[in-house]
Structure formats: structure tokens, C-alpha cells
Amino acid sequence: MSSESSDLWVFTGLDGRDYAYLGTMPQGGGERLYVWDVTDPTNVLLSDSVAIDARRVNDVKVNDDATWAVVTREQNSARGNGIVVLDLSDPGHPAVLSELTENLTAGVHNVWINGDIVYAVNDGTNALHILDLSEPTKPAHIGIWEIRPGEEDKTLHDVWAEDGLAYLSYWDDGLVILDIGAGIKGGTSTKPRFVSQVKYRVDHGEEYGNTHTAFRYGNYVFVGDEVFGCSACVNGPRGYIHVIDVSDIENPREVAKYEVPEAGAHNVWVEDDILYVAYYQGGLRIVDVSGELRGDLYRQGREIGSYHTAGTAEDSYTPNQAFAWGPQPFKGNIFVSDNSSGLWVLHHEPPRPLIP
């Protein structure tokens, strides 16, 4: 399904049908969130779209009971930006319920929903802004957390939270882990406390940190870096997946990596011992991450599937070139947004074990 796409979220609506909400970039229309009915994954239907005043609708997240969603805005015409809250009473036709721009006018790149709390990545402050959506019609700004307060040379890109811990992708400051209710440092969902940090450097002809995204699974956090403009970036970005062992949460350490040499990593998802990576020009990559992880997973042959998400001249902005953005497994299929060619629905059968 073609349009210059950003992130996606797939879920079951209150009406019992399945939907994929897909953001857009400027070339794909910007200012729109597309609503795809994916109940029959072999016959995906455009149900609706929501106009949102923004050149870039980068991220969308749906709360646990699928009653409301948060959409991020960047490059708003009135420089308001912030977030837009959608009412999902009719999930095939969501409606704008409210918005919040206070303290978020520079733009919000990513968000994560934790109950009634929304963690928002502020493009202007490069801090984690904490929002209260207990009344979705009246979202309120209630807090902020940032590394190295008062200093400006930092970039917060992403946030992911689960089980009382938040994982912040803080670019050259690396992975930052916060207690938001885990009982480790006395943090709460509205008053996070620092737990630990992992900084790393990546050599792609030059040195970078570029910590872009993080996803916790079991005793590991899968951290992706994103590198543009390096001497090796001749056909697009570079960057790979760092596997961080957090079995000792206060002393995390990198123990493994997954690196596709000719491409750059973007967003990830891990489920049922399988890592899904939207690997930009490398398309979707599927990796077995069962058991203990050590060393170079790519060279160990742990990749168990891949798909080149490239469209044709008729249905993509850059024909014959993948630019995979975000993956999400859902009900036995894999949904992938590609920046150039839109929404893909894929099915993967893991290889069967060899029987001697």
C-alpha cells in the first residue's frame, strides 16, 4: 500500500476488527494518519484517514484497552506541534479528541503509553516529557526527565517502557534506563529515577554513538543505532543491533551484535524468541534470538528470514529500493512499514529443525 510512510501500530479495535494505523512523511502527504482494516490480512482495505496539521506524522501508539491513541506531530503549520489524541470508539474511523502543545511546540518525535501516562520525546528540549492522559479530553503536562540537566549537547530519540522500567535511546549518551515503578531506585511513573547507562561507539569509517531505538526482551535489550553520512554509507545508512545484557540491571553490558554489513538498522520488535528488524535498504530481517546470546549473531547464521520491501515505479517513491521503517508481528503475520512503498503484510514460517 503506497505512500511515504513512517511508523505503524497494529491492534484489535473495540469492534473486534483488526487495524493498522500508519503515519506519513511529507512526500506521502504528511498531515495524515492512514487507517487500514487488516482483519483479512490477504485483503487489506483503506478504512479512513485522519487529517492532522503536521508535515510529519512520525509515531502512533494505542493504549492498552484500545479506547484512545496518541499521534505525534512535527512541522505543524502554526508551530504548535505536540501530540494529538484520537478517540477510538469507532476504530475504523478515529476522530480527533484533543491535543496538547504546551511545552511541546518544537515537535514530538516518539511516544510510549504506560497506562494513563504518556512519555513524549521532545525535539526541542531533548528531554523525556511526562503527560497525564487520565482524562484523554484534557491531556496535561506533569513532568520532565533529562540526562545532564542544563547541558544542550544531547539528543533523545526514542522511549520504550515495561514492568516499571523505561529505556531511553539517548543518541551519543547511549541507552539510559530509568526506574518508573520497578522498586529499584524509588522511581514512579511520574518521577523517574536513573538506574544505569550504556554508552558505545560504532566504527563505520568514523566514530558514532547514534543510539536510535531500544526494545527489552527477557534478559536483553536490543538497541539499534542509526548512522547517516559516514564514509561507508554509499548506498544509504548504516548501523546495527547491539545486544545488551541487563540481567544485572544496574550494570548492563553489551554481549552480542547483529549487523547486516551493507545496510542500516531502524526500528525493531522482539516476540517469541524472534527479532524483527526493519533494516532500511536491507528490508525486513528476521533473527533467532533464543537462548544465550554472545558474539556476532549475523555470522553465526541466526538470520532465519528476510524480505526486500521494495515497490515498483507504480507503487513507491523509490522503485526497486527497500527502505524498511518499522516491523510489528501480529496474529501470525508481520506488518512492516516502508518509507518508500507503504504498508506490507508478510507471513513467515520459521525453519523446521533438522531431524537426522
Image: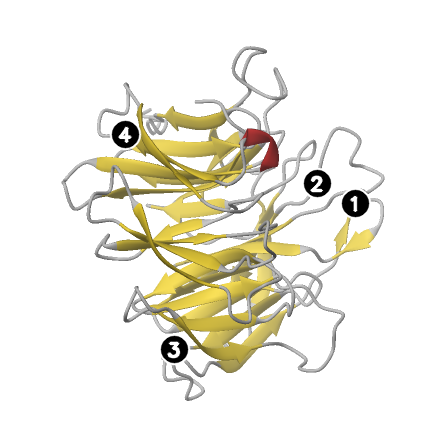
Residue 168's disc number: none
User: Dots 1 and 2: beta carbons under 8 Å?
Assistant: yes
- Secondary structure of the residue carrying tag 2 is loop
Which callout, 4 or 1, points to the residue nearer the camera?
A: 4
State which quadrant residue 201 falls in.
bottom right
The residue that mark 2 highlights is 238
Q: Earlier in the sequence, mark 1 or mark 3?
A: 3
* Nearer to us in this view, 146 or 122: 122
For this rendering, which residue is in front, 109 or 325? 109
The residue carrying pointer 4 sits among few (fewer than 14), some (14 to 19) or many (20 or more) residues within 10 Å by Cα, namely many
Could you tell me which secondary element the residue under label 1 belongs to? loop
Q: Earlier in the sequence, mark 4 or mark 2?
A: 4
Disc 4 residue type (three-letter) = Val
Q: Which mark is residue 38?
A: 4
The residue shown at (54%, 78%) is: 145
Q: Residue furthest front?
A: 78
**Mark 3 sits on what residue?**
189
- Counting from the top left corner in percent of width and height, residue 20 is at 34, 37
Specify which label sits upstream in the sequence, 4 or 3: 4
How far apart are the two marked residues, 1 and 2, measured between alpha carbons?
7 Å
Q: Residues within 10 Å of mark 2 (few under 14, many from 20)?
A: many
Q: Position of residue 237 (x, y in %)?
A: 71, 38
Apparent side of residue 231 relative to residue 10 in the rendered image (left or right):
right
For the C terminus, give its image quadrant. Answer: top left
Q: Residue at x 59, y 25 (%)?
A: 322
Left or right, 271 with respect to 246, comes to left
